[in-house]
Image (tube, grey):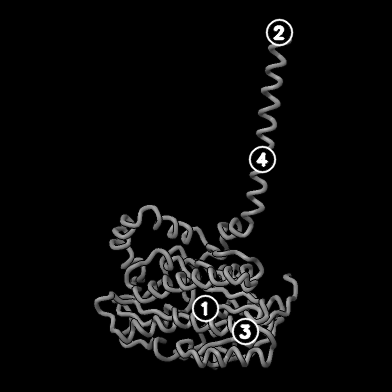
Amino acid sequence: MAPKTGRTVVITGASAGLGRAIAHAFACEGARIGLISRNRERLETARAEVENLGGTAMILIADMADSEQVDLAASQVEQQFGEIDVWVNNAMTSVFSPFKTMTPEEFRRVTEVTYLGAVYGTMAALHRMLPRNHGTIIQVGSALSSRSIPLQSAYCGAKHAMRGFTDSIRCELAHDKSKVHITMVQLPAMNTPQFNWVKSRLPNKPQPVPPIFQPEVAAEAIVWASHHRRRELYVGMPTVMAMWGNKVIPGLIDLYLGRTAYQSQQTDQPEEPDRPSNLWQSVPGPFTAHGSFGNRAKESSQQLWFAKHKWMLGAVMAGYAAAAAVLSIANRGDGRRSRFTDD
């Protein structure tokens, strides 16, 4: 059982999916959590779950595309729970569609929620954290922040923008010698309900690109990142492969995704015509942390374990290398002495 920290945490997009899993993970530490979303009914359920797990929660109805609503939510959290220690920018939306059929309004909305929502959240957090020189901001990123895929141009662009924006702020914090920390957790495909409510023009139902992970894997990484001053944290080997592959063979990956990623983002079930989406308004329904792909979702990541323990592993490997060097020198010395004895 993790120690009870009693920290104050704000999570955007907290009513379902990954945000709800993140809330559960922080609740197990006894955190005081501000849950931000547009859906009051699901927030009420999420609050009850947080309190059952040992945390305390308050709900805040806000659209992340509205900077005034975001700043007001931050003020309300501090009025009730005290100084914000951790702010998690998780809210997102997307549209599954070829770019040629996207509308300007759809592209703007995805950008405002996914990218500008993170900007507004970061702004609200920094306005409160910088004067006291304390706090952590976590940007919930994606492998798509480096390696884009077709059919999600607005979302990929927003995640790229989030990464560039975060790098800039990180430089400013370093210049000011601030102790406020900002990090980005890059995620693989997750089994969340977003595929049930995302706006889509695809002929078949959308799905995450396999391999798929349960949201608890990402939630574990995000809570861990809140305790450690990592610049970035990659979750899952698919994320590592996407990030590094794009550095080495981006052109080949373009061709590969052009051939495969239309199909890999769709199931074999036809999409329902006129299905409601959450692009403009929250979709009602009892959605939880998990989506409908649990039978294919991984519940752990060996890569994440190695990423969390890389300094320890590096020290062990350095120790082995030093021991091997000492043994090699000793063996050469024994060989020389043996030749002298034979002579």
Q: Earlier in the sequence, mark 4 or mark 1?
A: 1
Badge 4 density bin: few <14, some 14–19, many ≥20, Cα 10 Å: few
Residue at which label 2 appears = 342
Q: CA distance from mark 1 to mark 3?
A: 19 Å
Q: Is residue 222 left or right of residue 200?
A: right
Q: Evaluate if marks 2 and 1 touch, with contact meaning CB atoms under 8 Å apart.
A: no
Q: Residues within 10 Å of mark 1 (few under 14, many from 20)?
A: many
As measured in the structure, the alpha-carbon distance from the residue carrying label 4 to the one carrying label 1 is: 41 Å
4 and 1 marks in contact (CB < 8 Å): no
On the image, numbered disc 3 is attached to which residue? Answer: 128
Three-letter code, disc 3: Arg
- The label nearer to you, 3 versus 2, is 3
Q: Which of the numbered marks, if any, corresponds to residue 320?
A: 4
Circle 2 Cα neighbour tier, 10 Å, few/some/many (<14 / 14–19 / ≥20):
few
Q: In front of the other: label 3 or label 4? A: 3
Q: Secondary structure at mark 1?
A: loop
Among the 4 quarters of the image, the one containing residue 106: bottom left
From the viewer's perspective, is residue 64 above or below residue 305? below
Residue placed under numbered mark 1 in the picture: 90
The amino acid on which the numbered mark 1 sits, given as a three-letter code, is: Asn
What percent of the width, then of the height, locates residue 88? Answer: 57, 78
